[in-house]
Amino acid sequence: MRTSFPKQKIKVLLLEGVHPAAAEMLRSEGFAVTTQDKALEGPALRKALAGAADTPDSGMHVLGIRSKSQLTADVLAACPRLLAVGCFCIGTNQVDLTEACRRGVAVFNSPFSNTRSVAELTIAEIIALSRRMVDQSNLVHAGGWDKSAAGAHEVRGRTLGIVGYGHIGSQVSVLAEAMGMRVLFFDIISKLALGNARPVRSLAELLKHSDVVTLHIPATPMTEGLIGKAELKQMRPGSILINNARGSVVDVPALAEAIRSGHLAGAAADVFPHEPAGKGEKFSSELQGLPNVILTPHVGGSTEEAQAAIGEDVAAKLIRFINNGSTTGAVNMPIVDLPEQVHADPTAAGDGKRRSHRLLHMHRNVPGVLSEMHTLIAELGVNINAEYLQTNRDIGYVVLDVDPQFGKQILAGLKAMPATIRVRPLW
């Protein structure tokens, strides 16, 4: 498809070791792709996205990140050419979604692709902590030998409490029940229970009745510090806490004290409030060195299968947005799912098909925009073949398929409208 902006000039920057499948897909579309293994922060990220000040065409159009690079309002303000961001992970809290929306930057993620990988890690940790496998392994590695069964338990018949019964939490529920565990769950939204899992009315009730508590919730102001000193005291003596969700949801010093005091029998954490930006940087946590504690470096979704699936999923959404204008899968934009911009025209030369001129118009959600747009097009005598509109609180997204004559005049008129945020033409 020929676009108004040559594909080979669309620049994509993929950070944090995004799976090669994503770069391969984007390059196959003709985009210019640059990859980097590490995260970038602040000035370094702004420089990489904005390009050289004396080279107007050097800025990036698409950014791909995982969980480390922070796309703040300041960074977004410095990158006017940025069209879209791909978060090659589940969460999007590393992006200022409101500011991105106001600037017409679509943000995509992959909320389902690593579900199984995180669920399997959680199940593995439940078994390992219940059997004190890490302590036993370390003892034998050091030349020790202790066959005592003290503190080791089967998981069958024990109660698992799941906080957050979304895609991952419900998958953990199914796997745990298959092993003979009794499953309770708590979610702020009413969810369909799978199998014999049972919802409870409050977090306190779940903590009180669970032998193992596992967290699968997003990072929001509501969940920050959700498990603190008071909540840890509500947990059963000898129980286990697993956090494979977000580092901000657990008070780590309080958890470390609960382990040291013997109130909790063990814990696992894959996420932390402060994490190194990349491989080789030193990590420090109050949980280090404590007995029956498993610490992993944010690898819940880091299986080859999950990362490949995430790479392909997010790259496909980015490609469709750049080539077609569809915002399906965006987390911060009005959702418009668009057909290919081709329609039959028996009078057209060549293959008997004529391409419309597609105009993607993002604007502030204020009254009168459509009226002004329609007046402009009507005065030029241009026919509208199709029109798509969706809005959210902040912006509206209008997609127009029009006859190709007067394309430059329509584009100039749309750019001049006071409410316009961004206009992008496609052929």
Image (tube, rainbow, N blue to C red):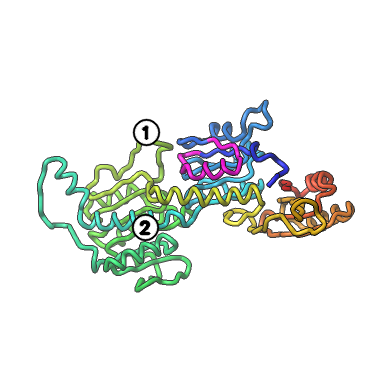
The answer to whether residue 124 is left or right of residue 394 is: left
The answer to whether residue 234 is left or right of residue 109 is: left
Amino acid at circle 2: Ala
Q: Residue 119: which disc?
A: 2
Residue 390 position (above or below residue 247)? below
Q: Is residue 423 visible?
A: no
Q: Residue at label 1?
A: 280
Residue 400 position (above or below residue 144)? below
State the separation of the CA atoms marked 2 and 1: 27 Å
- Percent position of residue 54, x then y: 67, 26
Q: Examine the image and state in which quarter residue 156 appears.
A: bottom left
Closer-to-camera residue (122/100): 122
**Do the CB atoms of the residues marked 2 and 1 lie less than 8 Å apart?**
no
289 in magenta:
no
Amino acid at circle 1: Gly
- Please tell me which of labels 2 and 1 falls first in the chain: 2
24 in magenta:
yes
